[in-house]
Amino acid sequence: MSEDYRSRIGTLIRDARRHKGLTQTELGRLLGTSQSAVARIEQGHQNLSLEMLARIGEALDRELVTLGNSRPQHLRIVGGAKLSGAIDVKTSKNAAVALLCATLLNRGRTTLRNLARIEEVNRIIEVLSSMGVKVRWLPDSNDLEIVPPATLDLEGIDEDAARRTRTVIMFLGPLLHDRAEFRLPYAGGCDLGTRTVEPHLAALRSFGLNVVATHGFYEAHAAPHQPDKPIILTERGDTVTENVLLAAARNPGTTTIRNASPNYMVQDLCFFLLKLGVQIEGIGSTTLKVTGVADIDVDVEYSPSEDPIEAMSLLAAAVVTESELTIRRVPIEFMEIELATLEGMGMQVKMTPEYLSANGHTRLVDITTIPGPLKAPIDKIHPLPFPGLNIDNLPFFALIAAMAEGTTMLHDWVYDNRAIYLTELTKVGAKVQLLDPHRVLIEGPTKWRAAEVMCPPALRPGVVVLLAMLAAPGTSVLRNIYVINRGYEDLADRLNNLGATIEVFRDI
């Protein structure tokens, strides 16, 4: 093994150990060796056999060497116990991916503080790295440092990583100012039916970007210019708003965006762009006025705000297990409709005074849940653009409705087939009737039962099934949880800290 490979593998092992929260001594104990031996391995001064690499990978729950396709992760859940204690909400997944795309605007060093270490972030890091961007996790932290090269290597882009995330479409906005022609692989992500990219392409045409989809790539041709009129978004989408913001950030004129999303990840992107010197009026509203900067070269630090979808997940965990939990760092501005809906179903909570997130803008509270009986709402539950009930929070109401007395209708009008995945709850005892691809009826309360279930191929329904298994007495198995790892960091371990019994395993 060459010294270069030893060094790279040592760094990988060190980062995985720190991510797992182990000391060198603790890892040495798991491997039956000494702290000094682990130190030599991490410094690249030790030859390693495949057997030792496999043992290290098992200890760190990280596949360091893969032959063919890696084996999927599964969860074994012993349900039926109440949870207790306190848990912090992690920073936003959706803000993280937008901010990573936004770093392409900056020729200086960007440090993103307290970023979620999730698979979606890992995929974008892989794509950025393949383009020549230097990306590294700072020691003993969730802080990510990003330093761009003088010229991006778009020809070297990691196509496999790019196709496993829809986020790559948000490279269009930053890149249109630097290349007359470029191409990006088609985007992937959750299987939620056909999501048209036409709103992105229509909006970016105002900046002189024309895109043709051919042979698995977006073929882009750019002749950047100032939009000659306000950009009217045909749908108030989060990512399309972000893409237009990224395009406008390097445009020295003033761009007006109407019917913009004011959602949490869009606000985080706006606050970050302010730090880059971009002027933005109307943050938090549906009309944004953006005055860009032709060249951005600043060293900047930013911490995204907490994730309201994870906060809703944890509230649902408390409801389904009938537990008293304290959920800290909840972004209340983006949870008020959800909490009002829960109050209408009979849920009670205690809430602290507000305080600010590390980004200096987002309002947070700590919420303590009070277990008690719930009743079905009088009207259907459906999402709306912010400040309405968040579309990504709707699936958690399926779980909550299954705990409530009566029949609840959920109307998921946004996605073509996500409502279908909620019928997976029937395998663990819920009474879920599919009316059409967008509407389900849920009758409660539910007598949960253990089961073995293949994880739905969509992030939020996958977590909903996991949380239902926490309530089901006995041992359940949730298979192939990659989609959950896309959006949640160490979810099993964090739930275990609250009293759950969840084991991560792989098939032999």
Image: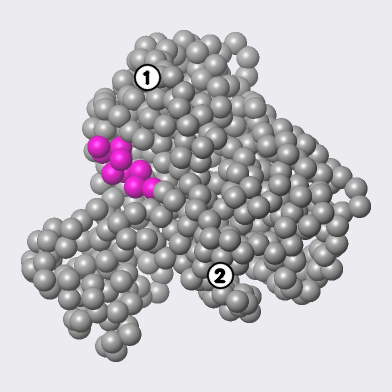
Q: Which residue is under mark 2?
A: 148
Q: Say which residue appears at 34% left-offset and 25% top-offset.
A: 326
Residue 48 x %, y %: 20, 80
Residue 232 x %, y %: 84, 43
Q: Is residue 351 toward the left or the right of residue 269 in the image?
A: left
**Of 343 and 222, the residue lying toward us:** 222
- Foreground mark, 2 or 1? 2
Magenta-colored segment: predominant secondary structure: helix
Q: Say which residue appears at 61% left-offset and 27% top-offset.
A: 389
**Of 112 and 171, the residue lying toward us:** 112
* Callout 2 amino acid: Pro
Residue 490 belongs to magenta span: yes
Residue 167 x %, y %: 60, 56
Residue 134 x %, y %: 48, 71
Q: Is residue 365 above or below residue 193?
A: above
Q: Say which residue appears at 26% left-offset and 33% top-offset.
A: 498
Tell me, for residue 369, which label it has, or none. 1
Q: Say which residue appears at 61% left-offset and 64% top-offset.
A: 297
Counting labels gives 2
Q: Is residue 227 toward the left or the right of residue 2 in the image?
A: right
Tell me the crowding category of disc 1: few under 14, some 14 to 19, or many 20 or more residues within 10 angstroms, Cα based: some
Q: CA distance from mark 2 to mark 1?
A: 45 Å
Query: Which of the marked residues, 2 or 1, is nearer the chain's N terminus?
Result: 2
Q: Quadrant of the N terminus?
A: bottom left
| Quadrant in which residue 328 is drawn | top left
Q: Is residue 272 toward the left or the right of residue 16 in the image?
A: right
Residue 128 belongs to magenta span: no
Part of the protein shown in magenta: 489-497
Q: Is residue 504 above or below residue 37?
A: above
Q: Secondary structure at mark 2?
A: loop
Q: Quadrant of the C terminus?
A: bottom left
**Of 244 and 471, the residue lying toward us:** 244
